[in-house]
Structures are given as structure tokens and as C-alpha cells.
Image (cartoon, rainbow, N blue to C red):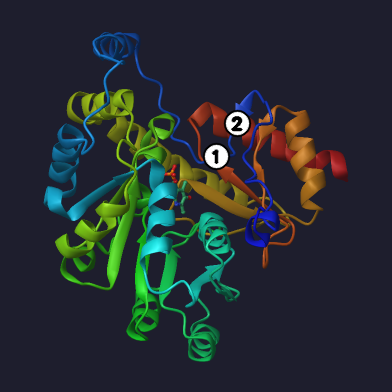
Amino acid sequence: MISDRIKKLSPYKTETTQARIRLSSNELPLRLPEDVRLRISQEVSKIPINKYPDPNASALKEVLSEHLRVKEENIVLGNGSDELIYYLNMAIGELSRGVFYPIPTFPMYEVSSRILGRQRVEVPLDHNMDIDLNASLLAIKTHSPVLAFISYPNNPTGRCFTRSKIESIRQEGLFTVIDEAYFHFSKKTFLEDAVSREDTVVLRTLSKIGMAGLRVGILIAKEEIAYEINKMRLPFNITYPSQVIARLILTEFYTLIEECINTVIKERDRLFRELSQMEGMEVFPSDANFILFRSNFPAEKLYKALLDRGVLVRNVSYLPRLERCLRVSVGLPEENDAFLEALEDSLKSFT
Ligand SMILES: *Cc1c(COP(=O)(O)O)cnc(C)c1O
């Protein structure tokens, strides 16, 4: 007796295609030196894996609270922010009320809403890939959703939406989730609102700063809100190895991550310039660690031509507003060079 809500879902698409250069999942191109890897393996070897981990992940939370400059009581951890998106969708408002988000955006907002059978109030972005405020306010008046998911910067378009537009939507009485998965590349945040207001929370993650394999997502909220969400948390949702490794990297090797982030930001700006100079190419400005671009050719054809040359990117052209668009993650300088070369070669082969 599987419900129609579930039967209508399609399995979540994750990228499994093999390629020499993978620039498809917005991971940080962090290469840990051998001595650091050794240190990690020593710490991991001490874990008593027959024992349950600390259900509150207190040691990791302590380090995160220092990094974020918020109290531990302001934090709820999830098995990736994906899990926290589920929790928020289950917790906020009655399930009979709708969920608002601009599209195209991160797919988990839709998936979690569908699973719960909540009405989805989806409003296409305007032609600058910003929130279409008039259309959003109209849709909110018509459908009265109670929860808004805002990817800030937005995946897959790359830019942070105009802040005052987000505030106008929140002003309509929607509980607003600001998903700051790419904060380290945008440096823009709603963190102050999250710790002081009852209608705003911020999501962060370790996934885009070099630790996607650990699955650690972070919700920051006012104590009262964090307390309620924490009740829903599955007891041991952060694994023992994840707690140990994340804490070690954040305390002892964080400078390696910062260096890599700085490299990616520089490379993002270089990639943007180089792509902009290519004929017939439309490139969208990015506050994140990926760039959206549109060529004159069918996206599937260009995607395949790049893959033939060993470079994997994400084909996002099936999404609303994104006809002929591909998304490329910013990698190490040599990876980006290989991408640019493959792109020029592909375009040349088409003419
Ligand atoms: C990558 C990404 C996440 C990360 O999810 P995790 O479950 O923490 O890996 C969350 N939100 C957005 C918008 C993303 O692009």
C-alpha cells in the first residue's frame, strides 16, 4: 500500500558518470596532504565502532559554535542539510498549508514537499535570475503558503537573490529557510536574523567546504526553534567517524580549507572572464563555487562533447528558464584549464 505521494516520485538523480575531470557536483577540490590523511586515519582507528556515537555530537557542536559565533543551543546538526530540509518541512506549519520557493532551485525543497503531500507554490525566476517579486507576492496571496525555502546563493543559477525581495516575502508571514550552502563563496548571510527572529533559520553545510563525504549539515536558529527541531532528529544521525573527522579538520587543518576556498573564488572570477569572452556565450554571474552558462548549441550536444573530452559538467537545461544551459563547478586551476580547452575544442567541432 505505497501511497500515491511516493509512487509519483522519481528516484533522486545523483551524478554517477565517470570522467577524468568531474566538475558536476560543486565539491571543493581539496587535496589533503599525506601527513594530514595519516593523522585522520590515526584518529579514526581509535573509534570504538561497536559503540553508539555521542547522540548530541557535543564535541563537534562546540567547534562549530566557535566557528559560527553562535551558542550551541542555536545549532541542530543533520546528516547533511538535506536531512534538515526534511525536518523543517515536517515541522513548520500544518501539512495542509503550502511551501513556497522560486524555481529553478535546489531539488530537495520539492522532493521533501512532495513526500509530505504539501502544496508546492513554485514561482519562476525573472530574467536576471532574481526572485520575481510581483509574481511571488501574487502566488502567496492566492495560495497562502507558510514556509519558504530560499537557496542563497541559488543553486543552479549562482547568484544571491536581492535581500529586500526575500524580506518582502518573509513579511507576508512565511517562515523563511535561508539555505547558505555556498556561504563561504558569497560571504553574505542572514545569520543575525536566524539567531534573533522566530521566522528565520539558516542552513549551512560542510559539504561545499571539502567534507561532502562526512554528511554534516548545520541548522542555525533561535534557541526555542532549535529546541523544537532537535526533538525530531533521529538519535544518532551524525556518525562516529563524521563527528571525529569533522572536528579534527575544523580545529587543526582549517587553514587548508580556507586556502582552497580562496583559490576557488579567484578561479571562479577567471572562469567567468574567460567564458564571457567566448563567442555566443551567455555567462551568469556567480556568488557560489559554480558557474551557469548558455551556449548557442543544444545543451545535450555540448554536454556530450565535453564528456568525450574527459570533462563532466551538469546539464541543467531541462529546468525552467535554463534552456541550453550547463553548470560547471569551479575546480583547481589545471582542471578549469582543461574544461576551458575542452569547451573551445567542442565549440570548434560544431562549426
Ligand atoms: C549542495 C547543497 C546542499 C548540501 O546538501 P548536503 O546534504 O549538506 O550535502 C544544500 N543546499 C543547496 C542549495 C546545495 O546546493
**Residue 51 vertical position relative to residue 214 in the rendered view, above or below:** above
In which image quadrant can residue 260 be found?
Answer: top left
Quick check: can you spot residue 181? Answer: no
Q: What type is the residue that disc 1 sits on?
A: Ser
User: Circle 1 is placed at which residue position?
Assistant: 25
Q: Nearer the viewer, residue 115 or 245?
A: 115
Q: Nearer the viewer, residue 62 or 131?
A: 62
Picture residue at 81% right of the left edge, 53% below the top: 297
**Residue 46 vertical position relative to residue 258 in the rendered view, above or below:** above
Q: Is residue 336 left or right of 262 when viewed as pictured?
A: right
- Number of marks in picture: 2
User: Circle 2 is placed at which residue position?
Assistant: 22
From the Cβ of disc 1, is ligand 1 less than 8 Å away?
Answer: yes
Picture residue at 31% right of the left edge, 32% below the top: 257
Distance, label 2 to label 1, CA atoms, is 8 Å
Picture residue at 70% right of the left edge, 39% below the top: 343
Q: Residue 267 carries which label?
A: none
How packed mark 1 is, by other alpha carbons closer than 10 Å (few <14, some 14-19, many 20 or more), is some
The answer to whether the residue labelled 2 contacts the one labelled 1, judged by CB atoms less than 8 Å apart, is yes
Task: Give the residue furthest to the front.
Answer: 1
Image coordinates for residue 25, horizontal then vertical, percent: 55, 39
